[in-house]
Image (tube, rainbow, N blue to C red):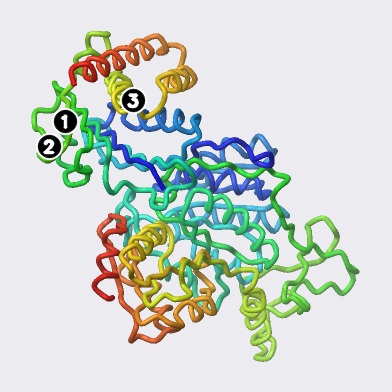
Amino acid sequence: MSGFEIRFSGAGGQGLQLCAKLLSAALAREGKTVAISQGYEPTSRGGLSRADMVVSDEGAAEYPLVTALDYLVVLDRAAVGVSEGLVREGGLILIDARRVDKMPRGKYEIRQMPFSETAMRLGNERVANVIALSALVGIGNICARETLEQTIRTGTPPKFLDLNIEAMQQGYALADEQVAAA
Amino acid sequence: MSNRTLPVNIQGNHACALGAVAAGCRFYAGYPITPSSEVAERMSAELPKVGGIFIQMEDEIGSMGAIIGASMGGSKVMTATSGPGFSLKQENIGYAAMTETPCVVVNVMRGGPSTGMPTRPAQGDVMQARWGTHGDHPAIVLVPSSVKEVFDETVRAFNLAETLRTPVILLIDEVVGHLVETIALPKASELDLVDRKWADGPKKGFQPFAVTDDMVPPMPRPGDGYRAHFTGLTHDESGFPTQKPEKVAQAVGRILDKLERHRDLIESYEALQTDDAELLVVAYGITGRSARKAVAMARDKGLKAGLLRPITLWPFPEAALKEATKNARHVLVPEMNAGQLCYEVERICGTERIARLNRFDGEAISPAHILEKIEELA
């Protein structure tokens, strides 16, 4: 069975569970089967938080928890150590350039990107999650950009819709920069 | 596809609530506790839509009492909890077994003992689910390993409770309870639902606990005019207490026998590559899925491994295990506890062939971990 594994990780309150929820809804729209699991520490703000996805093309994943990540997103230094040894060789790691100062070591494709910085420029650091999610979709071609956009439009309360769409566009722009530079 | 709704991403605990409502549950009483709270939360949203009743009770004891009362009143009922709350429910679970009151009790297992680790997974309540309440009592315990199976087994739990007039326990581990998976829910018209057998014979001389062919007496519906008495004390056919040895033996014997006679209805399991298996893994819940992957990895390496995944934990599918271990030199029982189901497997297969793999640190057992053990034994 072909498929892949993704982890969104960072600190509680950064919207990591929402990333998995949006992306899994997009993938379900495209006919994929998803399993999501999560972990978080008792601290609701600042403690480690992670959302894991196992994506398969057909049928339920044999084992629904991650064992070898193809993609890892790290939005806070609290989450750097926790995924050690869990990323597949050659796996793609996207790291927030401002909030993470320690890089994972190994044979990975690591990209430091200005997720939180761009979010602050948009006026709300809390949309760093949507920027990172969109950058990941853009670089990894995980689903069609249009499908993610549809999902964000359906899943966002009206009050935050414009901001989230802008964040998504910034994420895609960051992805295009990375792809062009590569 | 035409019979099914479009696939959606659903959490295990929500699938339990949706399965319950689909099965006809119209009364839920509970006290929220991690990692089961989403069952209550979803029931509180779904039940009002179908004219059902949701009550948040003062505690788990009251919740269990409330569902028993509502079931005696004619409703299909459910409650959900986790380890500490499950301990509190035990006395009333025995009362439901003794009064033959259909009910479904969900236990989403977390790390124990005591309040343990609320958000971490464990499978430590295997024996409590079987023997938690005192005395010789029947116990049906179902243990799903995916979100889809949570839905299906919840529906089956209601059908078994209604058919056999007995409490049914749905034992879910935290991983499966909180897991979100893409599933297509069956439409209501697709489900085979069972309603309990109601008394409809003569009212005069009615015996609420009569010995019938199937060992399940029809239940008197309040308002239908039958006189009935329910008590936890050992009772004869009339429902009133007795201590006459022959009546006691008959009464307790019957509630045990009614399960034995319906094993074919109750027992469910997945057997995978067991025909030529020289090493059989027996695993359930999330560990069952881990074992499924480990067995596939072992087969890729040329090892003759197989899997028996009980979906009904109690009564244990004994005949299936005997059949699956025909050629097995080793039987490996991985569990997220210090060793519980392994005792039942040992009872059936003998101790010589049994190997254990236990983990009780709040982490799931990975496929690689099981594979390592398989390779060590092979």
Q: Nearer the viewer, residue A158 or B325?
A: B325
Label 1: few (<14), some (14–19) or many (≥20) C-alpha neighbours in 10 Å: some
- Callout 2 secondary element: loop
Rounded to the nearest angstrom, the CA distance separating label 3 from label 2 is 21 Å
The answer to which of marks 3 and 1 sits earlier in the sequence is: 1
Compared to residue A116, the image places residue B238 above or below, namely below
User: Residue visible at 50% across and 52% down?
Assistant: B80
User: Is disc 2 in the same subunit as disc 1?
Assistant: yes
The label on residue A110 is 1
Residue B83 appears in which quarter of the rendering? bottom left
- Give me the chain letter of mark 1: A
Q: Quadrant of the N terminus of chain B?
A: top right
The label on residue A104 is 2
Pointers 3 and 2 in contact (C-beta within 8 Å): no
The label on residue A137 is 3
Rounded to the nearest angstrom, the CA distance separating label 2 from label 1 is 8 Å
- Callout 3 secondary element: helix
Pointers 2 and 1 in contact (C-beta within 8 Å): yes
Residue B238 appears in view: no
Direction from residue B316 to residue B114 in the image, left or right? left
Rendered location of residue B355, percent (x, y)? 31, 77
User: Residue visible at 46% across and 68% down?
Assistant: B273
